[in-house]
Amino acid sequence: MSPKRIARILAGFGILALGAILIITIGVVRRRSPEHRPTTTQILGLVPGTLLHARNFHWTQMKGGQKEWILTARDARYSDDRTSVLLKDAKVTMIAEDGKEVMLDAPAVRLEVKGNHVQQAHMSGGVTVHYGEFTTTTDQATFVPDQDQLTAPGAVVVTGQGLKVTGTGLIGHPKLQQFSLNAQVNTQITQDSKRAKSRQKS
């Protein structure tokens, strides 16, 4: 038998063996139950839910090429339909018309989003608003960025510049630094300790 004929016979056996292996492999895969078949997540090595969860969350809202406000949070979880985001330890920073920063802090925030745009922010767990020398605190509040409107239904306390104002219900515009209480408004004048000491010395 010539060497060429021997090579052809061996090549034929190799092709037959490869075909048999492919047939056996396809049969085994088809017989595997659905629960044993690897999912896309398993194939790619992804952890389920990783695309809906983020740490050290950061969101910058732009308007007319300018930063409208900046939102940061320790933790963020998107809903399955990506229309809402739950945030932990959130902080919103915006620039008022006079150039001063206005900051809103809340332990828990639920954002209502549409694409890359935040429509509303529902804050709870104790909300604090810092603007200039004043600080406003309340249990829960809702912020609508497009209207620059902050509303709070419950008890509100405003402190700063020797004043303490309490009331129920709040409507405010953080960028304009305008806030008004709806009912049961009570104002207390508190003397600043440093000013009091300077007056006593004089």
Image: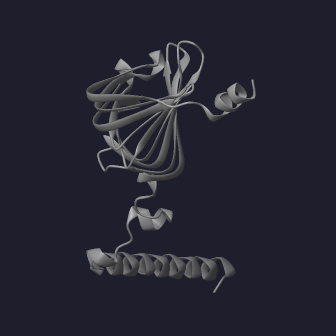
Q: Position of residue 118 (x, y in %)?
A: 38, 31
Is 129 displayed left or right of 100 in the figure?
left
Is 44 displayed left or right of 4 in the figure?
left
Q: Position of residue 115 (x, y in %)?
A: 37, 32
Q: Residue furthest bottom?
A: 1
Between 9 and 168, the one nearer to me in the picture? 168
Is 162 displayed left or right of 37 in the figure?
right
- Residue 100 visible in image: yes
Q: Is residue 2 above or below residue 60?
A: below
Q: How is colour applied across the structure in the image?
A: one colour
Q: Is residue 58 above or below residue 94?
A: below
Q: How many labels were placed on the picture?
A: 0
Between 143 and 186, the one nearer to me in the picture? 186
Look at the image and tell me in which quarter the C terminus lies.
top right
Is 2 displayed left or right of 137 in the figure?
right
Q: Residue furthest right?
A: 201
Q: Position of residue 150 (x, y in %)?
A: 35, 27
Between 163 and 58, the one nearer to me in the picture? 163
Q: Quadrant of residue 7?
A: bottom right
Residue drawn at the location 47% of the way across and 19% of the way down: 175
